Image: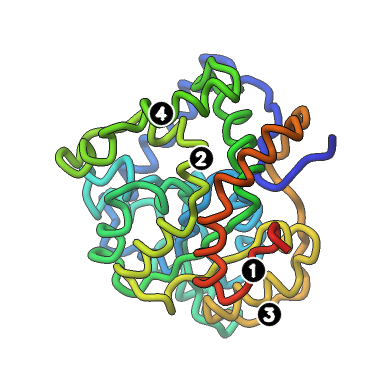
């Protein structure tokens, strides 16, 4: 089976020593970033989700643009979902220096932007409120794909990483019990880190409209740009042009389009696919009204 957008390829496992050295290097870089946080950029854009929908590919594609200065070290900082207690100075420490932005602007004639990609932001109960409060002008890019495929892709991903031990059908049966009360626990205790919300919400994270409506209430519709990830992978140029326009950036014709994080997996049974498709249908109907068009996977 060919790779699908958002799936994750098997990667070589780093040795414990290499992992330890990388963690130390990152910790040192973060500390230096925190100390110089006032001299650093704040994000102009966030790729907030959805998980397993091609967020890595979109981020890497955007990062090719000469006026896009991505977060350092890694694409996802996870500040607004998992590290909010570390404070804004810690967060700004992950982004390029203002002096770097000034040099880039002189060279390319376009005001540079910076951003990151943390696909848990869209789903986390508190991230939207935090983003709206701390980054009142930030723009959000959302990637969406067939939620049936997304659910199975997420399951495959989490199982490969050791966060899931059940079969896919059993994990779907367990999901309501696993998530019961987790939303309220996070709201009651902002420091609470929900394992099941992050790793085992296969169906709930594909109910995109609930998350998009919540974001819209917080930041407004004009600051959210939704991308059909299948369209991005099959005809990327116009999709990319739309994202650049949303971010206020000029075209960049030298962009190369590649898929990242693709994992091979077996096909779903027709019966299970049909049942999942029926589950998502009412959510997709609401999504169509929000988008102003039928999602690509329903056409």
Q: Residue 157: which quarter of the image?
A: top right
What colour scheme has been applied to the protein in the rendered image? Answer: rainbow
- Cβ atoms under marks 2 and 1 closer than 8 Å: no
Q: Earlier in the sequence, mark 3 or mark 4?
A: 4
Q: Residue at the left extreme?
A: 188
Residue at image point 76% right, 59% down:
257
Examine the rendered structure and indicate whether residue 33 appears above or below residue 225.
Answer: above
- Cβ atoms under marks 2 and 3 closer than 8 Å: no
- Cβ atoms under marks 1 and 3 closer than 8 Å: no
* Residue that badge 3 annotates: 251
Question: Which element is circle 2 on?
Answer: loop
Q: Earlier in the sequence, mark 2 or mark 1?
A: 2
* Residue that badge 2 annotates: 203
Residue 159 place in picture, x, y as percent: 58, 22
Residue at image point 52% right, 56% down:
282
* Residue that badge 4 annotates: 24
Question: Which element is circle 1 on?
Answer: loop
* Residue that badge 1 annotates: 294
Residue 204 place in picture, x, y as percent: 46, 43
Residue 281 place in picture, x, y as percent: 58, 53
Q: Earlier in the sequence, mark 2 or mark 4?
A: 4
Question: Which element is circle 4 on?
Answer: helix
Question: Which element is circle 3 on?
Answer: loop
Residue at image point 72% right, 39% down:
262
Q: Residue 23: which quarter of the image?
A: top left
Examine the rendered structure and indicate whether residue 255 appears above or below residue 198.
Answer: below
């Amino acid at each position: 089976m060919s790779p699908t957008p958002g799936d994750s390829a098997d990667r070589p496992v780093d040795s414990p020593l290499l992992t330890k050295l990388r963690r130390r290097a990152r910790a040192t870089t973060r500390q230096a970033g925190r100390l110089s946080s006032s001299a650093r950029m704040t994000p102009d854009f966030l790729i907030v989700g959805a998980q397993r929908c091609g967020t890595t590919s979109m981020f890497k594609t955007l990062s090719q643009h000469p006026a896009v200065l991505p977060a350092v070290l890694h694409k996802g900082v996870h500040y607004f979902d998992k590290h909010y207690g570390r404070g804004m100075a810690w967060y700004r420490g992950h982004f390029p220096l203002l002096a770097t932005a000034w040099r880039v602007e002189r060279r390319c004639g376009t005001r540079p932007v910076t951003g990151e990609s943390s696909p848990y932001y869209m789903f986390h109960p508190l991230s939207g409120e935090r983003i709206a409060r701390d980054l009142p002008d930030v723009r959000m890019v959302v990637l969406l794909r067939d939620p049936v495929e997304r659910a199975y892709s997420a399951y495959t991903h989490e199982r490969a990483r050791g966060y899931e031990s059940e079969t896919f059908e059993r994990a779907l049966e367990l999901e309501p019990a696993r998530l019961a009360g987790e939303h309220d626990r996070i709201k009651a205790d902002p420091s609470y880190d929900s394992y099941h919300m992050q790793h085992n919400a296969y169906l709930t994270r594909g109910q995109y409209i609930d998350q998009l409506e919540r974001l819209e209430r917080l930041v407004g519709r004009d600051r959210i740009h939704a991308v059909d990830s299948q369209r991005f992978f099959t005809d990327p140029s116009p999709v990319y042009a739309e994202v650049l326009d949303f971010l206020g950036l000029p075209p960049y014709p030298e962009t190369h389009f590649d898929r990242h994080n693709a994992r091979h997996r077996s096909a779903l049974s027709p019966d299970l696919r049909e049942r999942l498709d029926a589950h998502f249908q009412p959510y997709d109907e609401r999504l169509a009204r929000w988008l102003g068009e039928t999602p690509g996977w329903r056409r």
